[in-house]
Image: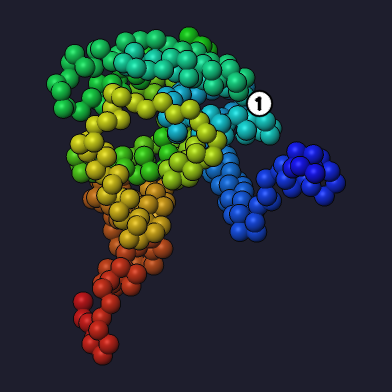
């Protein structure tokens, strides 16, 4: 009997079917599914937590989700859609993309994706690319002008669409980098708030990804297979100070895991009396009260968690 004749006979099913995965492959798949489930729960918990902590979304809100085509805004929309399904608070989502007429921009990608998800959307076409490139010398940073132009357009569109909130996709690492940018180049202790009123006074801007680690967003984008659109205007400016600052904190994180999270946590745990801003604390009028102060400084004691360890047998006198 030929091989062709034997096909389909009982006991010969293995001739036409691929071999079953071995135990090692199956274990890897199980582990991957477990890690993705953990990642999903963490992202939804962090975004939900930020929304609650800062009262970002309220009953009846219409949230304009600014979608650039990058991993962060895709993830923000994806998670907000999921949270909306289970939220007791009723709110609407509308995705908005600003088509800046960058050369080679694939205009079909975002509309196709949004239709596949059943998300209402608006594409605003404004040739800011030509404006920026005509005003900024080659090699110079374009971010400032580009950001101002985008901001004004998006604020206007939010009003036209009747949106009550504008959601931006900045994450935890963006917030930390912004603080260092302001410290290093602006001499200010100023970060990027999770919620604020826009500079025109007419819009409330929220950042639902405020608690999220960027590396988690990278993994989520890979898992969800978002159709990422690279930014040819600013994404290629490798000499940007922001890129260098981000590289700096990433190197810190490699050497000391958890450092970025500690810095971020410190931004919400400020003691004005131990800073230098006279507008935040009445240094000029404080007097000794004669009683212990819970927030008082232990002036002559070293902080054991920060001090350099002394060699054994050596007594250090401050």
* Colour basis: rainbow
Q: Where is residue 62 in the image (x, y as percent from the top left)?
A: 56, 20
Q: What element carries label 1?
A: loop
On screen, residue 16 versus residue 74, left or right, reads right
Q: Is residue 304 visible?
A: yes
**Residue 177 coordinates in the image, percent (x, y):** 31, 42
Q: Say which of 178 and 8 sits in front.
A: 8
Which residue sits at x=85%, y=46%? 10
Q: Which residue is drawn at 60% across and 29% down?
A: 81
Viewer-side residue, 50 vs 247:
247
For the C terminus, the quadrant is bottom left
Residue sticking out furthest to the right: 10
- Is 297 in front, or is 109? 109
Residue 64: horizontal and vertical position, in percent? Answer: 50, 21
Quarter of the image where one finds residue 189? top left
**Residue in the foreground of this view, choosing between 27 and 85:** 27
Question: What residue does disc 1 label?
Answer: 90
Number of numbered callouts drawn? 1
Label 1 Cα crowd, 10 Å radius (few <14 / some 14-19 / many 20+): some
Q: Is residue 295 toward the left or the right of residue 75 in the image?
A: left
Spot occupied by residue 245 in the image (x, y as percentages of width and height): 26, 44
> Which residue is at the far front?
1
Identify the residue at horizontal 79%, vertical 39% (top origin).
5
Query: Extreme bottom residue here?
Result: 313
Does residue 195 show up? no
Question: Can you tell which quarter of the image residue 84 is in?
Answer: top right
Q: Which quarter of the image is occupied by the N terminus? A: top right
The answer to whether 236 appears left or right of 151 in the picture is left
Identify the residue shown where x is 21% and y is 17%.
133
């Amino acid at each position: 009997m030929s091989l062709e004749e034997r096909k389909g006979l009982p006991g010969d099913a293995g001739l036409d079917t691929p071999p079953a995965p071995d135990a090692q492959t199956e274990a890897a798949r199980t582990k991957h599914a477990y890690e993705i489930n953990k990642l999903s729960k963490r992202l939804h918990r962090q975004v939900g937590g930020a929304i609650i902590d800062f009262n970002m979304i309220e009953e009846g809100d219409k949230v304009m989700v600014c979608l650039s085509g990058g991993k962060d805004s895709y993830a923000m929309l994806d998670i907000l859609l999921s949270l909306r399904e289970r939220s007791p608070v009723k709110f609407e989502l509308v995705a908005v993309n600003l088509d800046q007429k960058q050369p080679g921009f694939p205009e079909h990608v975002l509309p196709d994706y949004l239709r596949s998800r059943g998300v209402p959307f608006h594409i605003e076409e404004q040739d800011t690319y030509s404006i920026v490139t005509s005003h900024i010398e080659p090699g110079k940073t374009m971010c400032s002008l580009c950001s101002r132009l985008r901001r004004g357009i998006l604020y206007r569109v939010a009003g036209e669409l009747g949106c009550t909130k504008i959601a931006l996709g900045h994450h935890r690492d963006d917030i930390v980098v912004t603080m260092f940018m302001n410290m290093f180049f602006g001499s200010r202790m100023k970060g990027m708030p999770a919620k604020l009123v826009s500079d025109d006074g007419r819009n409330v801007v929220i950042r639902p990804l405020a608690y999220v680690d960027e590396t988690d967003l990278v993994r989520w984008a890979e898992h969800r297979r978002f159709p990422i659109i690279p930014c040819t205007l600013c994404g290629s400016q490798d000499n940007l100070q922001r890129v260098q600052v981000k590289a700096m904190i990433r190197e810190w994180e490699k050497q000391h895991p958890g450092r970025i999270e500690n810095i971020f946590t410190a931004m919400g745990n400020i003691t004005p009396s131990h800073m230098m801003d006279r507008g935040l604390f009445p240094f000029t009028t404080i007097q000794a009260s004669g009683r212990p102060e819970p927030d008082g400084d232990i002036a002559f004691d070293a902080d054991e968690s920060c001090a350099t360890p002394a060699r054994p047998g050596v007594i250090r006198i401050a």
